[in-house]
Amino acid sequence: MNQIPALIRVFAYLSLLTVGGGMAAFPELEKLTVNVHGWLTFKQLIHLYSVGQMAPGPNMMMIVAIGQWAGGLLGAIVVLVAFFGPTALLALIVGRLWTKLEKWPWRESIQKGLAPVSIGLLLAGTLSMARGAVTGWTTGGVALAVLLILLWRKANPALLVVGGAIVGALVYR
Amino acid sequence: MSEAAVGSVQDELALVRAGRENVTLLDIFIEFLIIGATSFGGVVPYLRNNLVTKKHWVDDKEFVQLLSISQTLPGLNATNVAILLGDRLKGWLGALVAIVGVCLPGATLMFIVGIHYRSHGDHNIVTSMLKGVAAAAAGLLLATVIQLGQKSLSHRYDLVFVLVTVLAVNRLHQSVPRTLIIVGILAILWYHPRRVTPVSVTQ
């Protein structure tokens, strides 16, 4: 069955939900790709999302893998364009209007108001993801260790994720 | 001391003017491609280091402004900054090559990873490693949200909006767009223009 139209619809829609960061769209990403369209399982989504944290560049590149699974090379390309196109166009337009909006009193209200909502959406997305990633004492310990290291020390996050892989290999082999 | 500060600001402006001169589309593409290929663990610090400190395509003040526009809009910060900066350097074509450059390496990598994960993802050793990777990623994401919150939340009341948003999505299972629209509008109204300027709320 041709999944291309569905991929375009889903990822263009998810694109507009990434206020504050990609994680804000995670609950909808889960619902649409796992439950509605069955392109992958929840576990696979967690795995791909996590592996994506080790890749360089913007941190939602794992969507390419979903596109590839559902629709081959075309699916991968279509997903990228659908996911980045709408917000890119919006950024282009708003970026050009921004200086004109400087005197508009609601601009600051919008910035201030959206800040806590976007943090809330990011947190909600993170908790949805953690529900699948933290399944016992070991995974909880790894997550907590990474959290504490990052809050108190300057460390490269990608390296810590690699560290997680090593712990996983040693503990669960 | 203030003279020195004024001098350094002028120096920076001159540097940026010189840095922006003769920038070609190819320059923009290659620079963003390099950032896209090397920015392990978060793109924004790499953008700042390469574009402000090394290339002088933008000064720090403008960079922070572009970042704050990026954070208000939907879209990832990395790609939004690429669009905004590319546009300022070379118009919409500059924006296009910047976003393609910053996405291309990671996208190619995840394309290949996706194919291999599909065929080898259920091997024991891979599953074990992925368990650890997912746990570490959860800790990383939580740390990112906390650090972002420390930077962008200014009032105790903000925590109420954060909490309501989380509860709506995770406990009441409201959809993200519905939550975004309803809580977003309430929060924007809470910070309506007459309230924003005189900070009447006690800290």
Image (cartoon, rainbow, N blue to C red):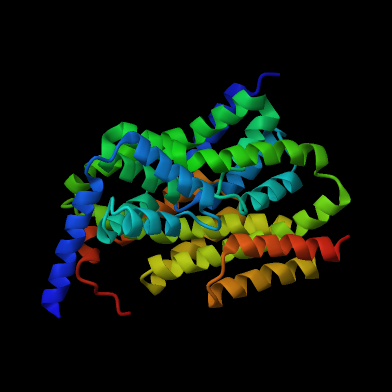
Along the viewing direction, whichever of A124 and B121 lies nearer the viewer: B121
> Going by the picture, which residue comes out furthest to the left?
B3
Q: Residue at x 48, y 68 (%)?
A: B147
Q: Is residue B154 left or right of residue A55?
A: left
Given residues B136 and B162, the one toward you in this image is: B136
In terms of depth relative to the viewer, which is nearer, B164 or A82?
A82
Q: Is residue B32 left or right of residue B39?
A: left
Which part of the image, by quadrant, shows the C terminus of chain B?
Answer: bottom left
Q: Is residue B171 visible?
A: no
Q: Could you say where residue A1 lies in the image, as x and y percent from the top left?
A: 71, 19
Residue ranking furthest to the top: A1
Residue B131, horizontal then vertical, whole percent: 77, 57
Q: Is residue A127 visible?
A: yes
Above or below: residue B10 compared with residue B93: below
* Residue at horizontal 71 percent and vertical 49 percent from the top: A47
How many numbered marks are there? 0
Does residue B142 appear to the left or right of B87 in the view shown?
right
Whole-percent x, y for residue A158 in the image: 60, 59
In this view, the residue in front, A71 or A24, is A71
Residue B28: x and y in percent read 36, 40
Quadrant assignment, res B56:
bottom left
Residue drawn at x 17%, y 56% as measured from the top left: B14
Q: Is residue B117 left or right of residue B201?
A: right
Quadrant position of the N terminus of chain B in the picture: bottom left
Q: Residue at x 70, y 57 (%)?
A: B134
